[in-house]
Amino acid sequence: MKDGISMGLREKCRIVNFADLGDERGKLVVIEGRQDIPFDIKRVFYIYGSDATVVRGQHANRESEFVLINVAGTSKVRITDGDEEFIVELNKPMMGVYLPKMIWKDMYDFSPDSVLLVLASTHYDGKEYIRNYDEYLEIMGVK
Ligand code: TYD
């Protein structure tokens, strides 16, 4: 809450720009849990070999927070809370998008060289996933 007005989706799911510690030898990006992003990192996974026809994600998580970064190539993330919606193009290794709990996301439009790195605040637990959009809308009270 900010000034009694609830935060918009873009404020909740903010773009994070990481510092580039690169020099003439090349680029270096560092992401420290609780310093550069709002959580301690418990899990890292990355998605590659998806192409422009694939839609991934299509779920919300009751417990996990994430930061998504295309460390190579590009992809898009459609982000919604069932009410508002916006799309982020992840197209540089120094930029990520933070997703708090209970946000629905679809990742798509993967370039052939896309490597989508995901930092997560939790260990994997399939039970915390909501994979049915109607159920998600009901939980969010928008249905
Ligand atoms: P899935 O959630 O469908 O991936 P995406 O979010 O990219 O669409 O996960 C694919 C499979 O991998 C599924 O069987 C669950 C498993 N998995 C794990 O075991 N641990 C993990 O951390 C993740 C993200 C997935």
Image (tube, helix red, strand yellow):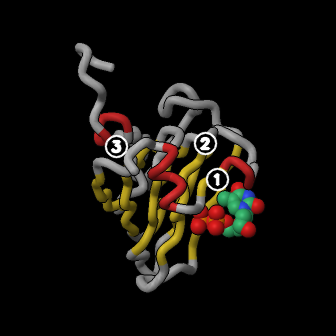
The answer to which of marks 1 and 3 sits earlier in the sequence is: 3
Question: Label 3 sits on what residue type?
Answer: Ile
Q: Nearer the viewer, mark 3 or mark 2?
A: 2
> Which quarter is ligand 1 in?
bottom right
Whichever of callouts 3 and 2 sits on the residue coming sooner in the sequence is: 3
Q: Position of residue 71 (x, y in %)?
A: 48, 60
How far apart marks 2 and 1 lie (CA) works out to 6 Å
Quarter of the figure with residue 77: bottom left
Residue 139 x, y percent position in the rendering: 51, 44
Q: Which residue is drawn at 69% across and 40% down?
A: 122
Q: Quadrant of residue 47?
A: bottom right
Q: Do the residues bearing badges 2 and 1 touch, measured as CB atoms within 8 Å? A: yes
Q: Name the residue under label 3.
A: 15
Measure how far apart labels 1 and 3 are at the Cα level.
23 Å
Callout 1: SS:
strand
* Residue placed most toward the observer, 37 or 6: 6
Residue 50, percent across and down? 53, 79
Question: x%, y% of residue 93?
Answer: 42, 55
- Above or below, 90 relative to 20: below
- Within 10 angstroms of label 3, few (less than 14), some, or many (20 or more) residues? some
Residue type, mark 2 in image? Arg
Amino acid type at circle 1 is Tyr
SS state under label 3: strand
Instruction: Tell whether circle 1 marks a residue whose Cβ is less than 8 angstroms from ligand 1.
Output: yes
Whether residue 134 is visible here, answered yes or no, is: yes
